[in-house]
């Protein structure tokens, strides 16, 4: 009984923390903090732009198409697991979930 | 007869299986596939070793079945993601769409299994129930509920582009689950008085690192902070540590002492007037010696701190670097404080000894 109580209480604690995190994420406080410490969205887009610019000359080479494909994969990459995400095929019938 | 701390027959057996997996990985890396960095190949190799170790543990120790089965499935899932790299229009078989769908479902399975495995592990070690399957089912049901709540939008095969803002928002709160479970274990430790020792706690520390990594990844993806693959290196280091501790646990469980200890911990061996020193005492003793060493050298700590402050003022690093160092110092202080409190409490209440119930 005591063990079940602890398990349920930890579960409830998780729900409360997750709700607080969700609220913190939607509020602008985190964005402002990131802006102050120099990690704002603006700084990031410039970095990605810089990387794309660096990769551009490669696309003029003979292997241009392959490099372009690599660039698009880089943009679609995710750090969640050890893999890059495959690029969705052109004319893909799939739909995106709404934001 | 085996002499020394490690059973080298076990090491050879595991290393042979692992080398076979690595050879297989090297061979298939020459086949046409989606681009993948070298760090990901290394991590795949480490996932293979983790799978071999967790699978060996759950076969060796009957009490570890419900604890290590989810981990084994999680690492197997990570390995099953590999075929997605070879599916594509210009690749070995299938189409890009098949590749994405395969990737998506295995990926969802992996993130579910990770949270479930960590929650189940923390609760099994903390509560040590007599009927482990009940807690296993409870953890499964709870994680499944949280998982469905967060990701039900992307279950449909029509959804192919899963990595968007909504996914990372869900990922952020979903990956809080293993983090909360592990931190609750730490906070409730003095009250729960778990009997498991250094190996379980070492594994949990690495799992906390991995869980926080998932959380950090979600935040960085949400805020578009480019990580330059640092997280992959972090993952590699964490997996190396995890494999090391998993092997130590496997080695211990394979020994006679480990088998008897395991039976005592799970209330399956009745010994009259039992008073056994728990295995976490050694770690705490080393920690106490470490703190005592600093206490002995207390006269040089203040000048050292002053030197650091002056150095910082002179170097004037970017604010993000200062914040990182400050956060690191605060966390270190809390960790020290926590362990000192726990050590004193355990010493006072004689919790370093497992007594007959």
Image (spheres, rainbow, N blue to C red):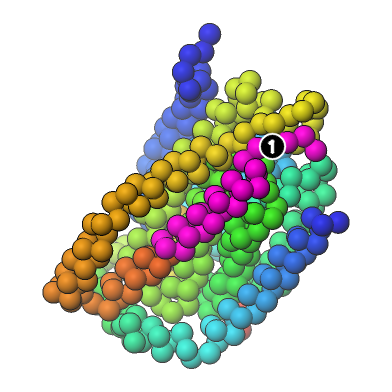
Chain of the residue where label 1 is placed in the rendered structure: B
Q: Which residue is mark 1?
A: B354
Q: Residue at x 86, y 56 (%)?
A: A1
Quadrant for the C terminus of chain B, please.
Answer: top right
Q: Residue at x 51, y 33 (%)?
A: B248
Q: Is residue B7 visible?
A: yes
Task: Pick whichever, B163 or B237, lies toward us.
Answer: B237
Q: Residue at x 30, y 56 (%)?
A: B298
In the depicted structure, whether residue A62 falls above or below residue B63: below
Horizontal arrangement in the rendering, residue B234 relative to residue A59 (left or right)? right
Residue B285 x, y percent position in the rendering: 48, 41
Q: Residue at x 52, y 59 (%)?
A: B338
Task: Pick whichever, B60 or B15, lies toward us.
Answer: B60
Q: Is residue B60 visible?
A: no
Is disc 1 surrounded by few (<14), some (14 to 19) or many (20+) residues within 10 Å? some
Q: Secondary structure at mark 1?
A: strand
Q: How many marks?
A: 1
Which residue range is magenta in the image?
B332-357
Residue B58 x, y percent position in the rendering: 66, 35
Q: Quadrant of residue B174?
A: bottom right
Task: Pick whichever, B121 or A77, lies toward us.
Answer: B121
Horizontal arrangement in the rendering, residue B169 relative to residue B65 (left or right)? left
Magenta stretch holds residue B333: yes
In the current view of this chain or complex, which residue is farthest to the left?
A: B314
In the depicted structure, whether residue B154 falls above or below residue B250: below
Residue B271 x, y percent position in the rendering: 78, 25
The main secondary structure of the magenta stretch is helix
In the depicted structure, whether residue B14 falls above or below residue B291: above
Task: Pick whichever, B79 or A55, lies toward us.
Answer: B79
Magenta stretch holds residue A74: no
Residue B227 x, y percent position in the rendering: 36, 67
């Amino acid at each position: 009984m005591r063990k079940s109580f602890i398990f349920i209480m930890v579960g409830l604690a998780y729900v409360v923390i997750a709700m607080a995190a969700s609220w913190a994420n939607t509020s602008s406080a985190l964005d402002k903090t990131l802006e102050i410490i120099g990690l704002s969205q603006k700084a990031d887009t410039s970095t990605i732009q810089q990387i794309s610019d660096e990769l551009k000359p490669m696309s003029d080479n003979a292997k241009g198409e392959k490099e372009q494909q690599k660039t698009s994969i880089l943009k679609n990459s995710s750090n969640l697991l050890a893999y890059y995400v495959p690029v969705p095929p052109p004319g893909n019938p799939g739909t995106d979930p709404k934001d | 007869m085996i002499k020394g701390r490690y059973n080298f027959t076990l090491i050879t057996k595991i290393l042979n299986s692992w080398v076979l997996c690595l050879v297989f990985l090297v061979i298939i890396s020459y086949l046409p596939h989606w681009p993948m960095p070298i760090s990901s190949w290394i991590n795949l190799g480490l996932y293979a070793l983790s799978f071999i170790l967790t699978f060996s543990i759950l076969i060796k120790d009957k009490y570890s079945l419900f604890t290590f089965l989810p981990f084994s499935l999680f690492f197997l899932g990570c390995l099953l993601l590999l075929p997605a790299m070879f599916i594509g229009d210009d690749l070995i078989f299938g189409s890009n769409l098949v590749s994405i769908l395969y990737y998506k479902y295995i990926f969802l399975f992996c993130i579910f299994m990770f949270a479930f495995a960590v929650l189940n592990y923390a609760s099994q070690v903390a509560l040590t129930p007599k009927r482990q399957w009940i807690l296993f089912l409870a953890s499964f049901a709870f994680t499944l509920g949280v998982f469905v709540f967060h990701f039900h939008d992307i279950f449909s095969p029509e959804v192919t582009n899963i990595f968007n803002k909504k996914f990372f928002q869900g990922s952020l709160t979903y990956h809080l689950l293993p983090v909360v479970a592990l931190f609750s274990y730490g906070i409730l430790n003095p009250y729960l008085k778990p009997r498991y020792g250094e190996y379980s706690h070492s594994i949990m520390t690495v799992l906390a690192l991995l869980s926080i990594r998932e959380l950090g990844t979600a935040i960085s993806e949400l805020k578009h902070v480019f990580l330059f693959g640092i997280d992959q290196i972090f993952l590699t280091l964490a997996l190396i540590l995890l494999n090391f501790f998993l092997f130590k646990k496997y080695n211990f469980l394979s020994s006679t002492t480990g088998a008897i200890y395991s039976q005592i911990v799970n209330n399956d061996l009745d010994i009259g007037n039992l008073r056994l020193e728990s295995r976490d005492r050694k770690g705490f003793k080393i920690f106490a010696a470490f703190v005592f060493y600093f206490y002995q050298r207390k006269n040089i700590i203040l000048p050292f701190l002053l030197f650091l402050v002056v150095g910082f003022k002179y170097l004037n690093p970017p604010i993000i670097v200062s914040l990182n160092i400050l956060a690191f110092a605060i966390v270190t202080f809390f960790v020290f404080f926590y362990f000192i409190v726990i050590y004193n409490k355990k010493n006072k209440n004689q919790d370093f000894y497992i007594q007959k119930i």
